[in-house]
Image: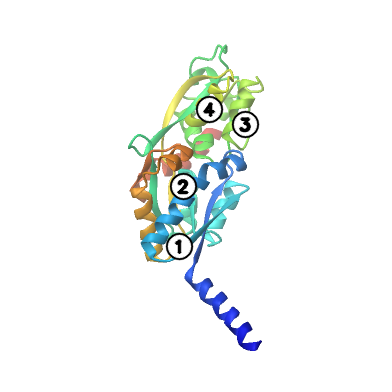
Amino acid sequence: MKLTILWIVFLAILNGFSQTNLTFGIYASDKPTEMIKQFRPVMKVLENGLSEYLGKPIKIKIHVAKSYTQGIDDLITGKVDFSRFGPASYVKAKDQNDKLRIITLESIKGKNTFYGIFCTQENSPIKSVKDLKGKKFAFGNKNSTIGRYLAQQHMIDNNVMSSDLLEYKYLGRHDLVGTEVAAGNFDAGSLKESTFKKLVKKGLSLREIARFENVTKPWIASGNMDEKIYLAIQNVLLELKDAKALKALKKDGFVKGSDSDFQKIRESIKRNAEFFK
């Protein structure tokens, strides 16, 4: 009996060492259930690719943080092994933990840029950003690149400050910005282009006012990630061609990136106080 128990314990220990468990972190910029559905296919491909590269089973758990701040904290403290952030969240996380490393950037049509959208109702008289003076405006999350920092930078560039707005509010998610603007609760709002297109396709009464360029989202390794695992993740993502996974992710692949790609985002965060003068 004792030998049997010892054998079972030995097998359990051996199995534990043979499999590496990783945790992938994201934060709820859209509905958490939709985000799990979006990332599960690419995680399965990544698991298989990493297992082949490293020569042992790899299991990846998806952890959805309730807020941008929690998502950042999860990565810089090592609660998750790697994460996918928006550019502003990456800049803030990097400032808090310089050991964080970019694994890859997402690719859209072979590029590492995409767009944020200023939207209004289809029948609204608003034609440009300058027309937002005296209007009610919906931002996304207070930590969002498109939902706040770049949108407010674009307003600054068009001489529209917070004091010029009748009212503004942070709604937390891109989809909520679109639905609230379409419902007439706000005159306009800022959200990412993919969410804007999805809502328009669903029949919501939305129209584009203006757009501004953003860097695609980086996938980032925690400061204590093993070098072999880091390189394996990078290689698998750069070589990823699985049509189903990429379709769910709404991207066409991954490209290499560096910290210098985010200088424009750093500048928008640095200048953000100008919007509130």
**Looking at the picture, how far across and down is residue 274, in whole percent?**
50, 35
Helix or strand or loop: what does disc 2 sit on?
helix
Nearest to viewer (mark 4 / mark 3)? 4
Q: Are marks 2 and 3 in contact (CB under 8 Å)?
A: no
**Mark positioned earlier in the residue sequence (2 or 1):** 2
Mark 4 closeness class: few <14, some 14–19, many ≥20 residues within 10 Å: few
Nearest to viewer (mark 4 / mark 2)? 2
Residue for badge 2: 42
**Looking at the picture, how far across and down is residue 205, in whole percent?**
58, 17
Specify the amino acid type for callout 3: Leu
| Marks 2/3: CA–CA distance | 26 Å
Observer able to see residue 257: no
**Mark positioned earlier in the residue sequence (4 or 3):** 3
Looking at the rendering, which quadrant does residue 235 occupy? bottom left
- Reply above or below: 52 against 201: below
Specify the amino acid type for callout 1: Gly
Residue for badge 4: 198
Identify the mark at residue 223; answer none if there is no mark: 1
